[in-house]
Amino acid sequence: MEKNLFEGFFSGDRLEQLISIGIKAALIYMLLMVFVFLERRLFKRIIARRDRQLADKTNLVFLRNTVIYTTYGIGFLTILRLIPGMQQLSSTALAGAGILAAAVGFGSQQAISNIVSGIFMVLFKPFRVGDFIDLGGESRGTVVDISLRHTTIKNAENRMIIVPNNVLNNQSIVNSSIVHAATCAFIDVGIGYGSDINRAMAIITEEALKHPLLIDNRTVEEKENGDPQLTVRVIALAASSVNLRAWAWAANTSNAFVLKCDLLKSIKERFDSEGIEIPYQYTNVVVKKAE
């Protein structure tokens, strides 16, 4: 009995049909890969041209992902229709597209929310590919890709942060590149109450002005009025220190970070050489003798 079933399944007509389906599926798969390769290559050239022109490429990146995913979907459906019995299923699915869409939407609300959020981000552009954004905590970096479901951010450690689009669409984002890439670095230093405040402010100014990454962010009017390029002020009289802050501008976020690190080091060295105290936290213990 089992032998008859085995022979019936691999009968001549059935075997020829399976071979034919396999060959057609293989051809469709190869054409699919060729189309995807050509699409990737085409979009790569267009995006490279946009890079050379310093133009926004966000729409192109999103369109590339959409076209490639659509091509994969069409190829999968085409291969599916080759399988006997699937033609009727495909026709029924197309005829009831509204009901199917509602059912899929109910079952995959999160995925659809990501897709819709991605479309909104491309249309309204709270950020673009190449912008430096901060989502809070350790989630900050440069946007490298916006797909249908998620956005990829490369942080300072060259790690990729994958964030769902609906999460980005529902939270506050600090965009350091959307208008002007120049970034202000706060240089905060505390000095002892017995130290010379004016001398400490002068040292901070000198060290900042000679740093190669410092830029002049003053307006034309501020320059005409003689406003200083670097501002240093006392921002707090703390428990054990007088806190000073300098507003130092750099061309972008990365330069601002390097500028801040370098200035903290050079200011500390100058303070040490000129006897200006940088206090550390300590506790006074008062011992009283009993009478």
Image (spheres, rainbow, N blue to C red):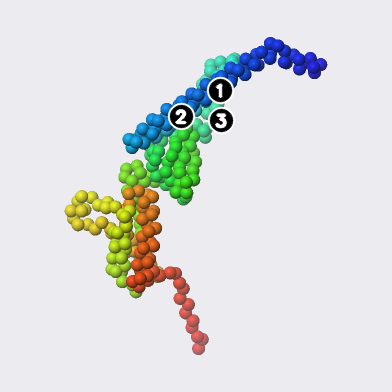
The kind of residue tagged 1 is: Tyr
Which of discs 1 and 3 lies nearer the camera? The answer is 1
Q: Residue at x 29, y 63 (%)?
A: 206
Residue position marked by numbered label 1 in the rendering: 29
Label 2 crowd bin: few (<14), some (14–19), many (20+), radius 10 Å: some
> Counting residues from the N terminus, which is met first, the one under dot 1 or under dot 2?
1
Q: Residue at x 42, y 43 (%)?
A: 142
In front of the other: 66 or 290: 66
Give x and y (percent) for residue 272.
37, 70
> Counting residues from the N terminus, which is met first, the one under dot 2 or under dot 3?
2
Label 1 crowd bin: few (<14), some (14–19), many (20+), radius 10 Å: some
Does residue 97 sit above or below 110 in this rendering?
above
Give x and y (percent) for residue 49.
36, 32
28 left or right of 119 in image: right
Quadrant of residue 133 within the rendered picture: top left
Q: Which mark is residue 40?
A: 2
Residue position marked by numbered label 3 in the rendering: 107
138 left or right of 124 in image: right
In front of the other: 25 or 96: 25
Query: How far separated are the C-alphas under marks 2 and 3?
Result: 31 Å
Query: How far separated are the C-alphas under marks 1 and 2?
Result: 16 Å
Quadrant of residue 203 within the rendered picture: bottom left
> Counting residues from the N terminus, which is met first, the one under dot 1 or under dot 3?
1
Give x and y (percent) for residue 2.
80, 18
The kind of residue tagged 3 is: Gly
Query: How far separated are the C-alphas under marks 1 and 3?
Result: 29 Å
Whether residue 92 can be seen here? no
Q: Which mark is residue 3?
A: none
The kind of secondary structure element at disc 3 is: helix
Q: In what quadrant of the picture does the N terminus appear? A: top right
